[in-house]
Image (cartoon, rainbow, N blue to C red):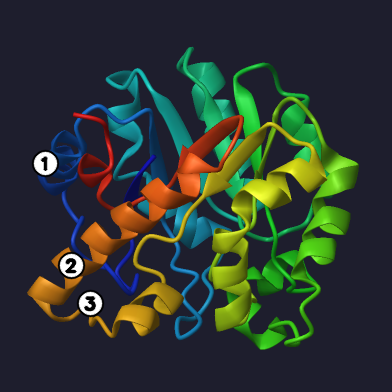
Amino acid sequence: MGVMNITPDSFSDGGELDTPQKIQDKLKSFGMIHALDIGAESTAPMNQAITWQEEWRRWQLVLPLFTQLKHVVSADTYHPETIFELVKYWKDNKLLYSLFWNDVSGKFDGAVRDYLKEGSRFEYVYCHNRAPLRELAAKHMDYVGKEDGHIEEELRDFFAPYIHEKVIFDPCLGFSKTYDENWYILDHFGKFQKNIKHDRWLLGFSRKSFLRKKFNLDLKDKKDKEQLDKVHGEILEKVLLKAQGEVWVRTHRPELILPS
């Protein structure tokens, strides 16, 4: 799943994709990805939240692409209004490939249930986020857990009631978690899968702050950024050796992890 941020302020690539040509070039660089994950609002803690109307305005830049694509599109948004505008676009344009709602809010509410009723093409990524309200999703680091070692039980209790064939679980690394919690989840990912007994997962930790901190790498430095993406691929390879079932990988540099 290749990441494409059409935002002015994402911490790793904000402002880079502001024309149709740049978007086309980015898509070509990904190679043979299985899915394209598009974000139009940065949920980095230092940035202000935007309205769904502003988010939808940004989506207009990429909508013309969709009649050309053949793989899954993943919409990284916590705004139900945005996702239902996309559902309407899918139906109006008779798009046959799947749309994933990659919802970082961590709220399995009525909007999610209504979305899952839209048809077989519409699937949902359920992310663990401790923020208490959907509209506070971007303020996730205000709700970091305590260093009490109970993340395993917390994730099990969070996900277990929502096992569904159209739902993909994402532990949401980097969201409302301590440094140690993020690494614990990565180190025990296979165990989490077994305990929660679900076959569909997503892992996304490309360029996350806990990864940068461990290896003392700065995204503003071109060489560091390149090294960070390579380190991500190496760690991911080790994690997936013990993983099971269907695991989607969300990454800024899919060409570094795709099999040759």
Please tell me which residue is depicted at 63% across the width and 47% down the height of the picture. Answer: 190
Kindly report the distance in space between the C-alpha atoms of the residues bearing marks 3 and 2: 10 Å
Splitting the image into 4 quarters, where does residue 215 fall? bottom left
Tell me the tag on residue 25.
1
Residue type at the position of mark 3: Leu
Q: Nearer the viewer, residue 139 or 179?
A: 179
Compared with 181, 173 (above or below) is above
Splitting the image into 4 quarters, where does residue 167 fall? top right
Residue type at the position of mark 1: Asp
Say whether disc 3 or disc 2 marks the residue closer to the N-terminus: 3
Q: Position of residue 88 (x, y in %)?
A: 58, 28
Q: Nearer the viewer, mark 2 or mark 1?
A: 2
Quarter of the figure with the N terminus? top left
Please tell me which residue is depicted at 24% across the width and 60% down the height of the picture. Answer: 229
Horizontally, is 26 left or right of 179 in the view?
A: left
Kindly report the distance in space between the C-alpha atoms of the residues bearing marks 1 and 3: 21 Å
Image marks 3 and 2: residues in contact by CB distance under 8 Å: no
- The residue tagged 3 is 219
Quarter of the figure with the C terminus? top left
Q: Residues within 10 Å of mark 3 (few under 14, many from 20)?
A: some
Q: Element under label 1?
A: helix
- Judge whether residue 174 can be spotted in this image: yes
Q: Residues within 10 Å of mark 2 (few under 14, many from 20)?
A: some
Q: Element under label 3?
A: loop
- The residue tagged 2 is 227
Q: Position of residue 171 (x, y in %)?
A: 64, 57
Q: Nearer the viewer, mark 1 or mark 3?
A: 3
Say whether disc 2 or disc 1 marks the residue closer to the N-terminus: 1
